[in-house]
Image (cartoon, rainbow, N blue to C red):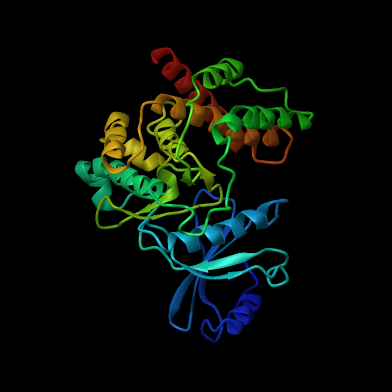
Amino acid sequence: MIDEAAVASWMDTVSLGTGPLLNVVPVTGGTQNVMVRFDRAGRSYILRRGPVHLRPRSNDQIAREFRVLEALGKTGVPHPALIATCDDTTVLGGAVFYLMEPVDGFNASVGLPELHRTDAQVRHDMGLHLVDALAELSEVDHVAVGLGDFGKPSGFLERQVPRWLGELESYNVFAEYPGPDIGPVDEVARWLDEHRPTDYRPGIIHGDFHAANVMFSRTGPEVAAVVDWEMCTIGDPLLDLGWLLATWQLPGAPEEFAGPLTRAGNLATAGELAARYAERATRRLDDLTWYIVLACFKLGIILEGSHARALAGKAPMEIGDRLHTTTLRLFERAVTLMEGN
């Protein structure tokens, strides 16, 4: 999993206990990044680094997470507390990494504790607390917490459609990929361009906010921590709300976004989630449908990349096929929303 001796030696240099790493176990979840839990000198840690086979931007993404978690420490947003960071790539075979406090909670994409499995009201309220965490994030002054240079908010909305059409086009580099058969991509793109909001208030975007990317409290419906900040940037926070609603109880693709929670049922409706956000945040929701459609468009194209890589033998075919189906369901949801708008 990791070079335990190398990590221990580095921890010596930053005064984080002494002795060997104990009880070293992998942390499971939906991420391709490596996460390991261990104990040292009576304290528990989570180590997070890029995937075993680093991609060109893996270290950059982990380094961005350093900054985000440090900034969130100045806010009320539930998140894993940052302990220490290592940008020395010689320690772990080319990977930067960081240590954070373990979160006392569970991931609803893995399973539900008895309380959450048997109490319908708790499951209903879990969605509302998801929105509470999102509303808290949307109100953070990104400049005040040190993220003024973290993204390029100017032109953020205008860049979205061409950026993701270009991503879809890039999959043609795989000779085995026959091209996208995922629904009316051009129609959705035109609608997004024609209905794009004219202005917005910049803020922090998680970038992949759905029910599988949080840890819930074991004793109630509250969110213990929002995790997986690798896609975080500065842009329009309403895209996070659109992302949550795009993935919420998605017909025909329950496994991608907290399957056990979705199957258990009695969840808050999308309308209830939007109303809760309107109560807790200061952002207008006049164009909410546009943000949901954009989320379907963007996420669908991202997931189609796994299908293209699978056809090229660079990812498991089972996963590629499943994510392709999810992309189809996302574009179907986009079209339904467009027709009803």
Say whether residue 264 is left or right of residue 252.
left
- Residue at left offset 43%, top offset 31%: 246
User: Number of marks in the image?
Assistant: 0
Judging depth in this view, the residue of 85 and 124 nearest the camera is 85
For residue 140, say whether it is visible: yes
Say whether residue 88 is left or right of residue 12.
right
How far across and how far down the image is residue 51, in percent?
Answer: 64, 55
290 up-or-down from 316: above or below: above
Judging depth in this view, the residue of 135 and 246 nearest the camera is 135
Answer with the quarter of the image where residue 58 lies. bottom right
214 up-or-down from 18: above or below: above
229 up-or-down from 35: above or below: above
- Residue at left offset 47%, top offset 84%: 41
Judging depth in this view, the residue of 273 and 162 nearest the camera is 162
Say whether residue 281 is left or right of residue 243.
left
Answer with the quarter of the image where residue 96 lies. bottom right
How far across and how far down the image is residue 99, in percent?
Answer: 53, 69
Outermost residue toward the bottom in this view: 18
Say whether residue 115 is left or right of residue 130.
left
How far across and how far down the image is residue 47, in percent?
Answer: 54, 66
Outermost residue toward the top in this view: 339
How far across and how far down the image is residue 313, in percent?
Answer: 73, 38
- Residue at left offset 66%, top offset 58%: 59
For residue 255, say whether it is visible: no
| Location of the N terminus (image quadrant) | bottom right
